[in-house]
Image (cartoon, coloured by chain):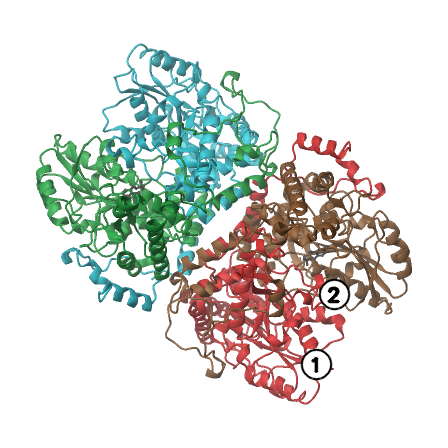
Chain colours: A cyan, B red, C green, D brown
Amino acid sequence: MPFIPHTEADIREMLAALGVPSTETLFDEIPAELCCGALDLPPALKEMEVTRLMRARAGQNRPLLCFAGAGAYEHHIPAAVWAVTSRGEYYSAYTPYQAEASQGTLQVLYEYQSMMASLTAMDVSNASLYDGATSLAEAVLMAVRTNRKSHSRRILMPKTVHPFYRRVVRTIVGSQALELIELPYDVETGRVDPASLEIHSGTDIAALVIPQINFFGVLEAVDELTVWAAANGAIAIALVNPMALALLKPPGEWGQEGADIACGDGQPLGIPLSGGGPYFGFMCCRKAHVHQLPGRLVGRTVDMDGKPGFTLTLQAREQHIRRGRATSNICTNQGLMVTAATIYMALLGPEGLRRVALQSHQNTLSLMSSLTAVDSVERVFSGPFFHEAVFRTRRPAREIMDGLAERGILGGHELARDYPELGEAILVCVTETRTQEDIESYARQIASLLSHG
Amino acid sequence: MPFIPHTEADIREMLAALGVPSTETLFDEIPAELCCGALDLPPALKEMEVTRLMRARAGQNRPLLCFAGAGAYEHHIPAAVWAVTSRGEYYSAYTPYQAEASQGTLQVLYEYQSMMASLTAMDVSNASLYDGATSLAEAVLMAVRTNRKSHSRRILMPKTVHPFYRRVVRTIVGSQALELIELPYDVETGRVDPASLEIHSGTDIAALVIPQINFFGVLEAVDELTVWAAANGAIAIALVNPMALALLKPPGEWGQEGADIACGDGQPLGIPLSGGGPYFGFMCCRKAHVHQLPGRLVGRTVDMDGKPGFTLTLQAREQHIRRGRATSNICTNQGLMVTAATIYMALLGPEGLRRVALQSHQNTLSLMSSLTAVDSVERVFSGPFFHEAVFRTRRPAREIMDGLAERGILGGHELARDYPELGEAILVCVTETRTQEDIESYARQIASLLSHG
Amino acid sequence: MLIFDRSRRGRAAHAQLLPESGESPAIPDYLLRKTRPALPEVSELDAVRHYTRLSQQNYSIDTQFYPLGSCTMKYNPKVCHDLASLPGFLNTHPLGLERTGQGTLAGLYELQEMLAEITGMAGVSLACAAGAQGEFAGVAMIRAYHRLRDDLARTEMLVPDAAHGTNPASASMGGFRVREVATDADGNVDLTALELAVGPQTAGIMLTNPSTLGVFDQHIRAIADIVHRAGGLLYYDGANLNAIAGKVRPGDMGFDVIHLNLHKTFSTPHGGGGPGAGPVGVGDKLLPFLPLPVIVKDGSRYRMLTETERPHSIGHLVTFAGNVGVLLRAYVYIRMLGHEGLERVAEFSTLNANYLLKKLVEAGFEPAFPQRRAAHEFIITLKRLAKEHHVTALDFAKRLLDYGVHAPTVYFPLLIPECFLIEPTETESKEALDAFVRIMAEILKEAETDPDRLKSAPHSLPVRRLDEVRAARHPDLAYKSE
Amino acid sequence: MLIFDRSRRGRAAHAQLLPESGESPAIPDYLLRKTRPALPEVSELDAVRHYTRLSQQNYSIDTQFYPLGSCTMKYNPKVCHDLASLPGFLNTHPLGLERTGQGTLAGLYELQEMLAEITGMAGVSLACAAGAQGEFAGVAMIRAYHRLRDDLARTEMLVPDAAHGTNPASASMGGFRVREVATDADGNVDLTALELAVGPQTAGIMLTNPSTLGVFDQHIRAIADIVHRAGGLLYYDGANLNAIAGKVRPGDMGFDVIHLNLHKTFSTPHGGGGPGAGPVGVGDKLLPFLPLPVIVKDGSRYRMLTETERPHSIGHLVTFAGNVGVLLRAYVYIRMLGHEGLERVAEFSTLNANYLLKKLVEAGFEPAFPQRRAAHEFIITLKRLAKEHHVTALDFAKRLLDYGVHAPTVYFPLLIPECFLIEPTETESKEALDAFVRIMAEILKEAETDPDRLKSAPHSLPVRRLDEVRAARHPDLAYKSE
Ligand SMILES: Cc1ncc(COP(=O)(O)O)c(C=O)c1O
Ligand SMILES: Cc1ncc(COP(=O)(O)O)c(C=O)c1O
């Protein structure tokens, strides 16, 4: 009986106290016909056995040198991050309902909120959402709730937003009678096509999503887009990579008065790739809109003696108080990931984070210049990029990816499924973890694949 | 400046407070001619870089399926052991000199001492020594100090004691005018040759070392040996594998009155192989001899309010008090390893430990019966064995070991260097971590090596 | 002290600080940041010490008894964390999962199969990030099912009044109107009320069984019949599966769709508020609608079904494949339990709950449903104390903290005044339960003789009672440097 | 509460409990154990909770300022632990090291080389498990050196009276008589006394420089000359290398043999009392005597020298290749520091010490050597307090604990009455030092106005002052169940 401490004597005494002959009796209110027989599950493994099994499984995962990004980024994670985050007191605590017995988690969350607010230059941050895609969906819902000027429930969603995010938004807002209007991109620059936006000028738009950096790695003209949103009474939703914000103009400073909501995925801030999760979503907004913010919020207050302390607050937004009329159904969020991100940001600091961002950017510049020096490799977009970029060769992307994988490299992400119009395009990413030698090796392998192909 | 928090402003302020122009001045009492120039060391690596380097290095270690023992044993280590042991409060604390601020470490050590005393059936245990070999050396020195009856400083050291232990004892007691007398083994049984012991009956012997299990994996006739020691006024030093004691008669119960000292290596109790260390040595003895025991001791006492607590005690034995006349020079010992061992023993309990021992034993029986079924493989000794045994084939041991390594198996330990008289013998070990399939595979590979050889 | 208070301009954890490259980015100036974010500037030791010490201010399973009802705070095996953290799993990029992550996918595939068996459902998707998202997915599938059948009038979701807040919230988010159904005196769904509530507008009902009142609804088959007959579907909120795992399966009770909280029944950590995982399971009717990804095995290779292969799927709910690391932990847990162990979970969590209830009643506490067996959790009400001594459940809860145990869930379910919802879980020993009873009895005495001791509790924690009103009235949600 | 108090017969951590095989061992009955060892029988949660909570009762670098003189309690980088714990390193069997552990050996080989460079020695062996064992090895090499030259009269080892206890203890263990050498008023070795002490009986001298008095002995070259001229060798106790790393090398000062404490200067953890590592380095004269193993590089492969290749080696000191896991941590640490970082260690540990000394003197504390610079540590004496207020250094130390800082080393070196040996290390910030000064000043005030507050300290720890006398008079060294 793994993880059950009861001895035979305990069981006897407890049953005697209850006056029942066996634990079976405790289930006597359950109609007998409902009870299932023995489950068809594999027999119990001892820790020793399951350890061997999982080591073998982990060994079946092939370690490739990673040049893939597209929403999940391999950054170096300081060892201290998870050494501290994994401590039992963080790991095995519940949501901090009893504030006095949860000051550790609560203060971490308060610090996290402060860091995110500062990084995005927004007033407030919540304490996390599930991931980047759900944060965008929640932002869209929040925008509709918040935008008193608009009655249209129409959302402008650029095609330069991560297609995986767009599909999640479709699922989540699908039953809300919202209209998601795609904005095409300029095939030359890889940015939102300004002309396509003009079409909507003067119409009733509830919100405009502005991705920075966008899915192609290209930097959008965020000021213009934000100004357009403000001018047209639309909520400006910034969808941002928080790591990039160490270097890029933060949403709170876009246009004249900044974006209204900033959201995104916090994975770049100290969270391992881990096959896609757990990561965490973040969301920041103006103070004026805080009552529409979904998710937990931690506030600083004082105790009976006037000593500062922390507690969950503004809970009237949440499902356990407001039930069917809550700002969101979210309850369990991604607390431990946020703990890791907080420690990560504390260890990196403003300068450390800036240098990671800058190094990633420069590594990508370096790769693109090596790649475009290879015959028949072309960069697809002319817009300025950050740490991802799109290129194309004369061979099918799938063959390039397979060839690179054989040579130990995860070459990026093929765009053909979501953007057939781009042909054999590959989205590649270079973070600070790749060395100059890695970069040259990538370019060399591409050259060799093209010379043999 | 990794791990140095000083900002430029800090440095300025601190230098100003000291009234010196630069840190250089603080070294002005050091004769200038002594100062070295820049060291010829590799340039600093960032954590990210050293992480990649060490992962590559770890990858250069080939993982072989382990059938080697000979003093270091691959047992399953519950994940909880190191998850808790690695906590900063244990990991980054010093020796518990300030008892009131070290009750965690002190209580763990007290519990450890209690567990070891019980496992060995001895009165008291110290808080650790470096490893098994040094524990034997310290035991020999302690025996000489303790044995008031003997004036000979002669120690009987069976050849069935691990040869690596014997060489360490030689080094450590080398300058103490002790005489180490080797006791041969019975080539038939693999045990201490009783006849060879009889030769010393009635002579002045300070101590007899009794290994259980012995280096060949064979079980010694510990009762007879202990009785002999008692009868001849020699201190009986039990050199034991603590894991095996879950199943085997403990030193405190050997012969009529038990062994006088029990020592050995604690590695089997939750310590990873780690290329040979850190492990830990243990030492237990009779209460009457506690003042001769080397190493730290923790005692239970009470505080000013009568509340129980723990503290280092009987420190008058130790170098920081007794200096040149201490029982040993040991200071830093292997505290963290003992923390792990304590948690390991708590998790396994008496029954868990017994089953690990029994399973290891039965796995070894199983391997030996498969092996001896292979043509031309012979077991070398007839004595009962525990979880190690010696076999020989008609091919050179080196070739067998190389052949197995090519097939992913660490086949054991060749005995030829230390026991040339045994020919092409290999000492093999099977712990509870090896499955029946592993065991069969080993036997199959041997058979195939022999059929091709 | 906040980490910001430790910050000094120019301080850094240098081992993490990449060299300054000197080159400026190839990015137009107007896109660049001009002000530094106010992240703290501290050394590595500062950060480690700060967050290590903060952690010590938490109560947690690893340090305290934590009988928080509805939350299933049981031991989170260390090995699950260790194995999910093997570099082979951690370093796999989500977009490389099929190509390079076959080991991960094998585990996920088997987890799908095992969860289907445990719940008696036809298919499982692991995509959802937590229970509430599982609920949303379930609701969305119910909606998609009716839509595909052109049954568009079904705009109402029934939810018992005892339900967890996420249930009505998820139903709303899924586009339904919520209609509450009353509970009868025994804590079961009031069948008469249900009969009255159902109709052609009924899309389905969301139920937890055993309910958050801590009792198993004996009329579950009748409920299923009523709702099914009305054309609605049954949704099972699996937060309480710990009470019945290996004993009764939602599928056998008549549920069409379920979610599980792996961070409850399957012992993945709560992490101070997540991450969790909320896999959903469905019967045959809803199979086509399962959220993606769903993992399938083609010969010896694992892969994820695409939208083309599952055209009726409600779609994706998270960016990638779900909280994979959490899923792997649950996989390890289930493999360690096996079928033998899984049955014991329900048996011993139920034994512990009933024993604790019995002892508390003996100690003078008032059960909410004295006539009923406890499931894996139960409710006591302190309304007498509130009336006679003006001591609230909250006061009592805060005083428990002083005794080194975490408080049970308070004021939920909303139906029962001044209530404690107490869930000891199966991983706690009889001694832990007996100690809790002693503490409860002690505080009961205090409440009667010295109520102020409770009203001003806690006394021995890092902070005393916090001013929640002030926190909400004057929200201070982020540190601002002066 | 002891873990034994939590034990219940038949309880177990079942995930760890192998199935009962039923078969009995093929071992004669008289060799078998008849009674169960009294190990605790607890669940996994019991064990995790017990040892997690116990850990919280420790002060440690990760949680407190810990200025323990001579111990170099600086930050132990987490990455060192992580990397030394990679499965590739942890799972390597010592007897497979050459065959399967080339990655490990590469690190060890480079560590040997780097330590030789840092200390200015010709060769290094990593075998020794701690500082004291390094001392023993050094002493044994000195002995072997004189013996090989048939210089058998050299039976005496000189040790300054300020030396750490391990020095004389190691000398004795190495078969030498210990002769103490006095310290002069400046804290240096008294040269006249030294001149008088040396002679044909002198095997060598064991020195720490800077000494445990916290000052650098300016006459080190003169000392070296005196001892060398007398035919003795110089042993350097490297426990204080933190003060001079990258600045001055023992080899350049004239030392023939040294040990290092990797668990001090090179930031491997102290672990509540080890494991450490005490590599030894030697000049050319002693190279042949180095303890084994010594790792060499043959082409691209690493291997360990055998006794046949090093016939004069003093031999082996531990079973296998030393505390490999500790060595790898130090290797990672040095690689992160590089030569730049290593020089900064001495600079900033010295800056911190001198600053702290200065501030403490300003606050009214009395330095033992006011005329000297502090090295990386320094001594203050509380003898005035003892005389005027009957408050001892121990009382003062215990009161420090109440303020959440660990006490400095007390009553060592033995020469200075009522002393604190204070070593802040370079990883502590100015703020930490300033806070310490404030606390010290506060306690000084208390000592003068309310000495009982100190004498009964600590007041806020898990236990109050412990009865050490009782512990020694009535030793209770192991739990006995009734
Ligand atoms: C009964 C019940 N339903 C649903 C939920 C929501 O689950 P989650 O927090 O994982 O979203 C909870 C969790 O608190 C619960 O107790
Ligand atoms: C000056 C000095 N020498 C030697 C030692 C002994 O080192 P170790 O404890 O590693 O054996 C110490 C450590 O306490 C020390 O401070």
Q: Does residue A375 appear in the picture of this structure? A: no
With C154 as the anchor, is A290 left or right in this view? right
Look at the picture and state if C24 lies above or below A23.
above
Q: Residues within 10 Å of mark 1 (few under 14, many from 20)?
A: few
Look at the picture and state if D417 lies above or below B133.
above
Where does residue A33 sit, x and y in percent of width and height?
14, 57
Q: Which of A307 and D227 lies nearest the eye of the viewer?
A: A307
Q: Chain of mark 1?
A: B
- Where ligand 2 lies, by quadrant? bottom right
**Which kind of residue does numbered mark 2 sit on?**
Ile
Where does residue D329 sit, x and y in percent of width and height?
61, 50
Instruction: Name the residue that disc number 1 marks.
Output: B148
Residue pictured at 18% horizontal, 46% vertical: C255
Q: Chain of mark 2?
A: D
Residues at marks 1 and 2, CA–CA distance in whole angstroms: 30 Å
Where does residue B43 sit, x and y in percent of width and height?
67, 39
Q: Residues within 10 Å of mark 2 (few under 14, many from 20)?
A: many
With D372 as the anchor, is A263 left or right in this view? left
Where does residue B295 sit, x and y in percent of width and height?
64, 65
How many marks overall?
2
The dot on residue B42 is none
Instruction: Name the residue that disc number 2 marks.
Output: D314
Residue A160 figure quarter: top left
With A49 as the anchor, is D247 left or right in this view? right
User: Looking at the image, is mark 1 or mark 2 nearer the viewer?
Assistant: 1
Look at the picture and state if D79 lies above or below D169.
above
